[in-house]
Image (tube, grey):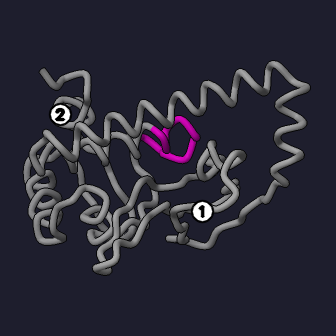
């Protein structure tokens, strides 16, 4: 479990390209299904200084078997991961570059706010344009254009290692799956 810092879960293809699956924030397990996997098919890397807490697989299974409340929380977490993966599939397969970047910024802002790590939609943002590109299947240059477009429109500003969401309503209009009809 990631206790402090930012990381990301990814896979490197045979041609050297990287696909980022998700960004890891404090409290994240990577992934929740790891209790049933002996060997992971992905790698994890840190974006910042991190603190990680390791659990023995057998101990997690024992606690889940004995505690129905913990089992329910685990199930809710697995369902949330599946829903997020489904959303990302739609983003990658059917959305424009602007909608892809908007989705990711909205998703991370909501997560940081829920963790109490955002101050009025402003938070430390160690993610580089190359990471965003590798997650969203677009080029770093395209990410740069989209971030510049968002800044010019007063939606968000990414500078000095911080992301400021200036117009949450507009970011939500662009990036929320609820608005995709």
Magenta span has 171?
A: no
Q: Quadrant of the C terminus?
A: top left
Looking at the image, residue 103 lies above or below residue 123: above
Q: Nearer the viewer, mark 2 or mark 1?
A: 1
Residue 137 position within the rendered picture, expressed as x and y whole percent measured from the top left: 21, 59
Residue 22 position within the rendered picture, expressed as x and y whole percent measured from the top left: 43, 53
Q: Earlier in the sequence, mark 2 or mark 1?
A: 1
Residue 6 position within the rendered picture, expressed as x and y whole percent measured from the top left: 54, 62
**Res 2 quadrant in image:** bottom right
Looking at the image, residue 178 lies above or below residue 14: above
Q: Which mark is residue 5?
A: 1
In space, the residues marked 2 and 1 are separated at their CA atoms by: 28 Å
Looking at the image, residue 92 lies above or below residue 75: below
**Res 152 quadrant in image:** bottom left
Residue at 41% across, 61% down: 125
Question: SS at mark 1?
Answer: loop
Q: Residues within 10 Å of mark 1 (few under 14, many from 20)?
A: some
Mark 2 — residue?
A: 170
Q: Which residues are magenta?
A: 111-120
- Viewer-side residue, 33 vs 133: 33
Residue at 23% across, 50% down: 156
Residue at 63% across, 43% down: 32
- Left or right of 70 on screen, residue 150: left
Looking at the image, residue 27 lies above or below residue 48: above
Q: Which mark is residue 39?
A: none
């Amino acid at each position: 479990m990631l206790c402090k810092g930012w990381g990301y879960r990814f896979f490197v293809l045979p041609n050297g390209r990287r696909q980022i699956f998700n960004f890891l924030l404090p409290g994240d397990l990577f992934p929740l299904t790891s209790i049933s996997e002996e060997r992971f098919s992905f790698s994890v890397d840190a974006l910042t200084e991190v603190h990680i807490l390791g659990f023995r697989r057998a101990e997690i299974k024992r606690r889940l078997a004995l505690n129905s409340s913990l089992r329910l929380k685990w199930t809710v977490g697995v369902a949330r991961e599946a829903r997020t993966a489904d959303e990302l599939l739609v983003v990658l397969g059917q959305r424009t570059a602007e909608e892809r970047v908007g989705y990711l910024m909205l998703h991370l802002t909501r997560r940081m706010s829920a963790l109490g790590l955002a101050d009025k939609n402003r938070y430390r943002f160690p993610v580089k344009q190359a990471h965003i590109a590798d997650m969203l299947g677009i080029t770093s240059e395209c990410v740069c254009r989209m971030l510049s477009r968002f800044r010019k429109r007063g939606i968000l500003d990414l500078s000095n290692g911080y992301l400021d969401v200036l117009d949450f309503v507009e970011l939500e209009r662009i990036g929320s799956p609820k608005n995709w009809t």
